[in-house]
């Protein structure tokens, strides 16, 4: 049995301070998530930080812009990882392209 070892792009920096942005997930946790939580088709994918509150601010449009850029590059899957102010970490996998529905476009919800 082989285990996935995803490559990780740690090159993202805070554009204001040029300091490396600390990752939420350790390499061991990334390895664990890749091998136990992700579909096989995603286990060997390169992981890149698309959005960081410290780097991109709190505007959700910045998150959507990062996700759209990844989708244009052929990747619609997004592993969303959130760390709370108390240090708790949670997340989820999105397999579709992120978008915002126009107001009033929802029916039956």
Image (tube, rainbow, N blue to C red):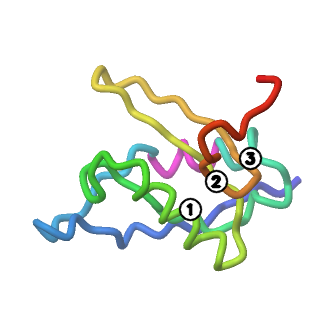
Q: Residues within 10 Å of mark 1 (few under 14, many from 20)?
A: many
State the image quarter where residue 91 is shown.
Answer: top right
Sequence order check: which comes first, mark 3 or mark 2?
3
First along the sequence among labels 3 and 1: 3
Q: Which residue is label 3 attached to?
A: 35
| Sequence-first disc among 1 and 2 | 1
Per the model, the C-alpha gap separating discs 3 and 1 is: 23 Å
Left or right? Give the position of 72 relative to 54: right
Q: Residue furthest front?
A: 104
Q: In which quadrant will I find the C terminus?
A: top right
State yes or no: discs 1 and 2 in contact (Cβ < 8 Å).
Answer: yes
**Kind of element beneath mark 2:** loop
Q: Position of residue 61 (x, y in %)?
A: 43, 55
Q: What secondary structure is the magenta-colored segment mainly?
A: helix
SS label for mark 3: helix
Disc number for residue 106: none
Give the percent coordinates (x, y) of residue 97: 70, 58
Q: Which residue is mark 1?
A: 67
**Foreground residue among 17 and 30:** 17
Taking 86 as reference, is 57 above or below it?
below
Q: Which residue lies at the image location 55% right of the left edge and 73% below the top edge?
A: 69
Mark pair 1, 2: CA separation: 7 Å
Residue 13: percent from left, percent from top: 26, 68
Q: Quick check: 106 left or right of 39?
A: left
Which residue matches tag 2?
Answer: 98
Q: Nearer the viewer, residue 29 or 2?
A: 29
SS state under label 1? helix
Stretch of the chain drawn in magenta: 26-32
Residue located at (26% from left, 58% from top): 55
Q: Is 80 situated left or right of 1 in this image?
A: left
Q: What residue sits 60% from the left and 49% below the top? A: 100
Q: How many marks?
A: 3
């Amino acid at each position: 049995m082989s285990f996935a070892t995803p490559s990780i792009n740690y090159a993202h920096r805070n554009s204001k301070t040029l300091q490396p942005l600390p990752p939420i997930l350790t390499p061991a946790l990334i390895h664990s998530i890749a091998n136990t939580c992700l579909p096989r088709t995603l286990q060997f994918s390169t992981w890149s930080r698309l959005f960081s509150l410290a780097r991109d601010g709190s505007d959700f449009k910045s998150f959507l812009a990062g996700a759209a850029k990844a989708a244009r590059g052929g990747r619609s899957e997004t592993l969303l990882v959130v760390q709370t102010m108390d240090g708790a970490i949670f997340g989820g996998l999105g397999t579709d392209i992120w978008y915002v529905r126009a107001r009033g476009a929802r029916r039956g919800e």
